[in-house]
Amino acid sequence: MRFIGLLLLISLLTFSCDTKERKRVEFPSKPKKVFAPLDSVPTFQADTAYAFIEKQLAFGPRVPNTPEHKNCAAYLDSELKRLGLETEMQSAKVTAFNGDALDIRNIQGRLNPEIKDRILLFAHWDSRPFADRDSEKKNKPILGANDGASGVAVILELLRSIQDYPKKPTIGIDVVFFDAEDYGKPSSSMTGEGNDSWCLGSQYWSENLPVDYLKPKYGILLDMVGAENAVFPKEYASRQFAPELQDKIWGLANDLGYGKLFISEAVGGITDDHIYVSQLAEIPSVDIIHYEPWRRDFGTFHHTHEDNLDVISKPTLGAVGEVLIEFLYRE
């Protein structure tokens, strides 16, 4: 993920950060229910989601044009196949902000392809090619445990839990792991015109959909969803593209006792893959993303070498997974 603020039809708002401390998030007791309880849903295993993060990080930084990137792409494609999806690897060449020619791979899968009523789950699987917010080794790539691997891991565990459960969702699910999301222009030189240097994989995918592609009715982006003390505010662009979807997910999260994680506070728009999926592919999408309004930042470890397994919280992974499983089975 990258830094940025308001976009769309309003002027750019650039977020700055301060050093105000955040208390540890404690999930409250269950509030009064708004949504009727379901009879049963699969159990999301946070331990397994964590293991999916470990597996991705074992390849090393997932930066385009590297062997580690290529090997991880093959692994993710094989995992989607193992979990019962029809898969397709979309390969392309794109040009980064600095002129680098990147060989990218968008990893796609379809569950229940015969069902016309579909939703899209997506995340980015690449990691930042440089630690531009770090004080050391700024030109070295980061592991991206939270920023990249966590969203992929939650989706993989969702699919695993569905596969192992007798009752299946009545909707079709499309999955895309986007590449080159995090190859954008560093924040130190970021200006309004630099926004499109991010999310290169989702831009390419959205502009090159097959003519006969059956578009999902909406999409859900998971970006940085595994950190301890994470919070997911209501992001502005999501509100513009899919307000009912955003309200439904956040309302369900509150019902499940995760109101201090899925907070009701609204924040400015964030340049992320959901922007291009919504605008270019015309699939209205929301972004579930870690952003700390009191600091105006994505976490102190964001785009540094501290974004490793030490920042990952199994309770956070479990909360996000539980909300999404409940959501999918209600659809």
Image (cartoon, rainbow, N blue to C red):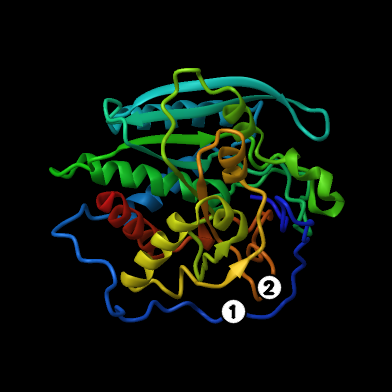
Residue 275 lies in what quarter of the image? Answer: top right
Badge 2 crowding class, 10 Å Cα cut-off, few under 14, some 14 to 19, many 20 or more, is: some
Query: Which of the numbered marks, if any, corresponds to residue 109?
Result: none
| Foreground pick, 245 / 73 | 245
Query: Which of the numbered marks, if any, corresponds to residue 22?
Result: 1
Residue 10 to residue 206: above or below: below
Residue shown at 76% from the left, 50% from the top: 137
Residue 255 lies in what quarter of the image? Answer: bottom left
Q: Where is residue 258 in the image (x, y as percent from the top left)?
A: 39, 71
Badge 1 crowding class, 10 Å Cα cut-off, few under 14, some 14 to 19, many 20 or more, is: few
Q: In this view, does 291 lie to the left or right of 134?
A: left
Residue shown at 32% from the left, 29% from the top: 85
The three-letter code of the residue at mark 1 reads Arg
Question: What is the residue that sits farthest to the top in this orientation?
Answer: 211
Q: Is residue 142 left or right of residue 190?
A: left
Q: Position of residue 123 (x, y in %)?
A: 51, 43
Residue 164 to residue 27: above or below: above
Q: Mark 2 points at which residue?
A: 295
Whether tag 1 and tag 2 are in contact, CB under 8 A, the answer is yes
| Foreground pick, 189 / 54 | 189
